[in-house]
Structure formats: structure tokens, C-alpha cells
Amino acid sequence: MKAAIPLHSGLTWPSTLRSRIFLILLIGLALAYGLSFSVLYMERYMSAKAVMLGTLENDVATSIAVLDRLPPGERGDLLDRLSRGNYRFVLGPGLPGVPDTSSKGSEISGKIEEAIGHRFPIRIERIPGDVNRLQAHLTLSDGSPLTIDVTPKGVMPIAAWLPYVFVVQMVLLILCTWFAVRQAIRPLGELAAAADALDPNKDGPALSEVGPSEVAHAARAFNAMRERIAHYLEERVQILAAISHDLQTPITRMRLRADMAEESPEKDKLVHDLSEIQRLVQDGIAYARSAHGSGEKNARIDLASFIDSIAYDYQDIGKAVTVIGLVQGAAFTKPHALRRILSNFIDNALKFAGSAEISVERSPENDIIITVMDRGPGIPDDMLEAAMQPFFRLEQSRNRETGGTGLGLAIAQQLTAKIGGSLRLYNRAGGGLAAEITIR
């Protein structure tokens, strides 16, 4: 799992582009939507408050005017009719309270005074208690005290079901953001997967060129790049094959002339040098053929007989090659290519360790694993991957007797790809090298 990148604020920033774009879009859209919701809420709150205060202003002004014109004995009959849900009229001084200096009290007082034309001075007091309660005290024209008992109620500018709609909208926002990010990032992931699996030596499927114009353009550019790389590699191998092939004729003529020369130390050295050159040329041709493939078809082979025949060929010429852990059964592969691969492994083991062991086993996935092992000096871990590159030689003296041509493992890797297998080199515990090929 990739670690997140720490931010200056102490939070963590996701390491994947998908998560970053998702968070940026989600946070931006959520803030924009929340701001719009807040503006709508405030606008409706202010509108509802204005309606409430306007109704209070008109109703209270009318009610006070009616009560002021009625005889004192008839005023009590109209109190219930004049009262509303958030205020009521009380004949008398009301309850004792404390002066109210809040903005709400001042606003209500101002609205009532403005409604009655400042004819009756008003005093607003707050009644102590758990309920927010105000009383407006005034004196009518005949000197009778009148109290307006006000219980301000919270303004509800939104319906009770609206918060649930908001939650559903946020869920839809998250889903749409995720889908948009997925659609935008998926082509990039496919491009990265295609780049990881890029192997010009294999005929794999081309990257799909459908989708938005930018994605299609990037896919076409990647496919064109892949074709150019394959063409360059093919040209390189063809040049190597052509040079190696053309060198065989002059080498043969030189070898014939050397053989007809008189015996001398110089003749022996010349023949030895020509043998090295001829071996290099032959390895170059073998590498070129392995890169292009020999057109060999798959065939069913008996594993035990096949491995034993390879070991017997070496044992017949006095080489220490043994078979351990032989698995019975059959395999469907290219026999000549597999034989060349194992021969290259065994030749390397004999050259550097003097002996080789061949192990055959099946994996839990029923793959066939053939390993050639030795007890030689091995290869440094940081050079295991480079060892399979063409012309790589761990021994840098350029002596063909000790370092070889550097094409054995490269040929083995090329042929392994041709038969659809995988190749792995690793150092054995206790010393030595193991070359492992897996046939699926």
C-alpha cells in the first residue's frame, strides 16, 4: 500500500491521483453546494422573519387601536380573539421582569411603536424563566395599563423533510464525483498497465484507441511508440544476424589457410583465435534466431524422458550433471527451444562450478518448474537482472575462456518468452546459482 503524503497542517494527502482528484472535486462541490444552501436558508429566514414582524406590526397596531376605543368593560371580551400564536394581550401591568436590551427586544419594540405611531410609549421587559418570553407594557388613552405578552417562536424557513433531501443530494454528489473520477482516471490506469506489460518481443494486444479525443490520441501515440520500439529491436537483431552470417565465409577461408600452414606456435594461436571468433559468430546467429523464433510448433513431451536424455548427453562426455526431484507426467511446449534453454543453463553451471543439478517440480497452480543449480560463485544480487542482457559478462577480462560471449542467458531469456514461460535467476542459500524456468 502506498503511503500518504503529509501536509503542513498535520493531515495526510493521498498518494494516488484518483484519491486526490476525488477529494478536490468532492470538497469543492460540497462547499459550493453548502454555500448555496446557506444562502437559500438565510434568504428564506429573513423573508419569513420579515413576514412575521410585518404581521405582528399590522395586527398589534389594529388590536391596540380597537382596545383603545372600546369601553374598559368590553375590552376583556375581545382579548382571546385579538391574541395570536406568538403573542397575547393582558389587561393590567403584567408580570414583573427585567429591562430587555437584546436586539430582538429592541426590534419588536420598534416595530410596535412604529405601528401605533408613537402614540403610546412602550417598555420592553424580559420575563425570567426557561422560556424566551417578553412583555411590552404601555398605557392606553384612558390611563389603563395594557401588556402584550410576546413569546417569540423560532422561524422555520425550511420544511421538515428538506434536510433528508439534502442528505440524499450529498450521497448523489459523492457517487457522481466518484464515477467522474473513475471515468477520467481509468484510461491512465490502462496506459500504465500497458506500459508495465510492454514487451516488443511479444505480440500482445494493442491499447484500445476508443474514448475521448485526448485518450484516443494518447493510446495511438503509445501504440505507435510500441511499434517503433519493436521495429528498432528487429533491425538491431537483423544487423547482428547479417554480420554474423557474413563473417562465417571469411572465417572459414582463414581457417583453411591456417590449417595448410606449417606447424608453429603462431599457427596454434591463430587457429585458437579463429575458433573464438567463430564461436562468437555462432552465438550471434543463435541469439538472432531466438529473437525471431524458429517457427517450432508445440508438442507433448514426457518430462522424465526429456530431462534424462539431456543429463545423459552430458554424462556421456564425462560432465557431472545429475537429476533430482524428477516429476512424472507430460508437458506441452517447444522441445528444441526448451532443450537449448536448459543446455545454456547447464553449460554456465559447468563452466563456473564444474557440476550441475536439474530439479523438476510442479507448483500448486500445476505449472512445471525446472531449475538448474550449481555451487559456483553465483552472481551479485544487484547484477542478476543485468546478467540476462545480451553481451553481459560478469568476468570483465574479455577472455572468452572464462567470460564467454555473454549471449547464453540472453538466448535463454528470448526462448523462454517464445515458449510462454518465465525465467528467474537467484543465488542459492549456502552459495551457488539457480536458474529457474516456469512453464505454464
Image (cartoon, grey):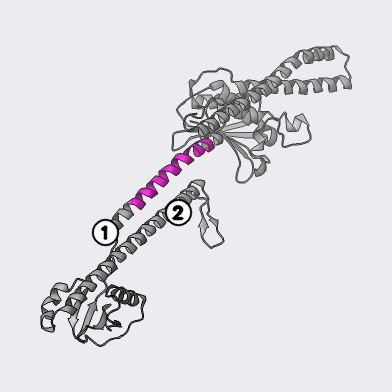
Measuring 31% from the left and 65% from the top, which residue is drawn there?
Answer: 50
Q: Position of residue 123 (x, y in %)?
A: 30, 83
Q: Nearer the viewer, residue 289 or 23?
A: 23
Q: Amino acid at mark 2?
A: Ile
Label number found at residue 87: none
Q: Is residue 221 above or below residue 184?
A: above
Q: Nearer the viewer, residue 109 or 382?
A: 109
Relative placement, left or right, of 392 versus 257 is: left
Q: Amino acid at mark 1?
A: Ala
What separation in Å lies between label 2 and label 1 (alpha carbons)?
A: 26 Å
Label number found at residue 27: 2
Relative placement, left or right, of 4 versus 229 is: left
**Residue 369 among those drawn in magenta:** no
Q: Is residue 286 above or below residue 378?
A: above
Q: Position of residue 78 (x, y in %)?
A: 12, 76
Query: What element does badge 2 sit on?
Result: helix
Question: Nearer the N terminus, badge 2 or badge 1?
Answer: 2
Read off the residue under disc 1: 159
Q: Residues within 10 Å of mark 1 (few under 14, many from 20)?
A: few
Query: What element does badge 1 sit on?
Result: loop
Q: Nearer the viewer, residue 130 or 268?
A: 130
Q: Which dot, 2 or 1, sits closer to the camera?
A: 1
Measuring 69% from the left and 35% from the top, which residue is drawn there?
Answer: 352
Q: Is residue 42 above or below residue 279?
A: below
Q: For the magenta stretch, what is the residue range?
A: 169-192
- Residue 343 visible? The answer is no
CB atoms at circles 2 and 1 under 8 Å apart?
no
Q: Quadrant of residue 156?
A: bottom left
Q: Position of residue 51 (x, y in %)?
A: 28, 64
